[in-house]
Image (cartoon, grey):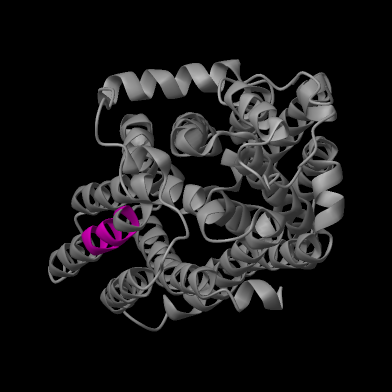
Amino acid sequence: MARLLANRNYLLLWLAQIISGLGDVLYNVGVMVTIFNHTGSALQAAGVLVATSVPSVIFGPLAGALVDRYPRQSMLITVDIIRALLVAVLLLVLRDEALNVWVIYLIIAGLATATTFYQPARQAMIPSIVPPDDLASANSLLIGANQATLAAGFLAGSLLVLIIPLRLMVLIDLITFIIAAILITFIRPATLNTAATTVEARPSLWQSIRDGAGYLQRHQVARPLVVMEIAEHVPHAIWTSALLLVFAEQALNGGPREWGSIVSAFFSGQLIGALIAAFWTRGVEKRPGWIIIGSAAVFGILTGLFALSATLAIALTLSMLFGPPASIRDVAQNTLLQTSVADDMLGRVYALRGTFMSLTFMLSGVVFAGLADFIPIRAIYLIGSGLYLATAIYALTSRALRQSTIEPEVVCPDADSAFCHCLENAKRKAAVGVVEVESMAS
């Protein structure tokens, strides 16, 4: 862990995520509570979910193609500047005392569009700034920092929203985007993504998108992993801020403070899980598939117990217990993708993954939010419990996931050696999704 934080490039990316993430969560808490208090409807509050999910569905494939085509560092800086400008527009809109929910939705959609380009660029950039042996630890620290930010942000935000205006929370978000852009400017990646350095004979954007989709479809590890993640985002939708706010009010007779505590407990648990993964990298690397399968089963059990929780203390405990397996699972999934997918396809794979997950999450969130206006909120969470168990069963049927391992990249000492020619041939096969490689022992 100390070695990673001594890596200047990684430290800058890590700090940029913490700073911008803190501003983001304060802004999201403020917007969510303000809209819910203004409309009194879970479905209206879930409009924020739609506004943040639709852009990923529409622009995700394009984002992946551009991330693999241009320098990822430039993409991150540009996106942070665009997000700062959009937040500045929201500040101007909030000067009007009459809250226009639809205008807020539009600005949130603009921010989500920018983030659609940001996420795959950041995730695909990690292998270029840390050694292969440190990938699992690097993902753990980034996830841990994100969860710590979310835990502190939701806890503080649920209190601050009661005493300070929404405009001040939005202003904090604006400042964090500017600071994050400055930090990323000083990153010096060891290598540029291959596509970004190749100007001649570039395929069209549409062809790049098709190539990425075809690659993902043929990849024997990435395909079942992404399919499982998409399926898992159906029950994930019950954990939206809007539905948790309804659960806090209807099931626990609470309010924004109790809601913030539940969300904060979950992210605190994820922070613990990220720290476990950081110190247990060998375990994550040896059995990533079983970690992914087991976490889905644990989600199902804990969600069912959460649905039946009678007190805030029980809900807080279960919410925190949900965090560690979620975080360790995220580390395993990201590291498995980063080590099994070719670098010049990584942005597209991440973007396509995000596109379908966002679409599933958005549609499921709207359906669950609509149901919450008609059936008890506890029933919603019991449904989610069953769906988690179903995804665990699907993952268990995938031999590629069960047998998957995370192996650090092999470095050739002599580029002209017969061994390295065989290794390059194996890499080319991996680039089209072939995972059963011929023996290189001849």
The answer to whether 358 appears left or right of 317 in the picture is: left
Give the residue drawn at x 67%, y 23%: 224
Asked whether the viewer can see residue 278, the reply is yes
Q: Nearer the viewer, residue 343 or 259?
A: 343
Q: Which secondary structure is most common in the magenta stretch?
A: helix
Point out residue 105 in the picture as x, y percentages from the top left corner.
27, 48
Left or right: 136, with 301 as reference point: left
Q: Which residues are magenta?
A: 75-83
| 367 horizontally vs 136: left or right | left
x, y percent for residue 204: 25, 23
Rendering coords of residue 241 (x, y %): 52, 54
Residue at 19 percent of width and 55 percent of height: 100
Looking at the rendered image, the quarter that the N terminus falls into is bottom right
Q: Nearer the viewer, residue 284 or 18?
A: 284
Please tell me whether residue 77 belongs to the stretch shown in magenta. Answer: yes
Residue drawn at (37%, 37%) of the image: 195
Q: Quadrant for the C terminus, please.
A: top right
- Looking at the rendered structure, the number of numbered marks drawn on it comes to 0
Residue 44 appears anywhere in the view: no
Left or right, 168 with respect to 242, comes to left
Residue at (38, 18) in percent of width and height: 210
Q: Is residue 73 above or below residue 195?
A: below
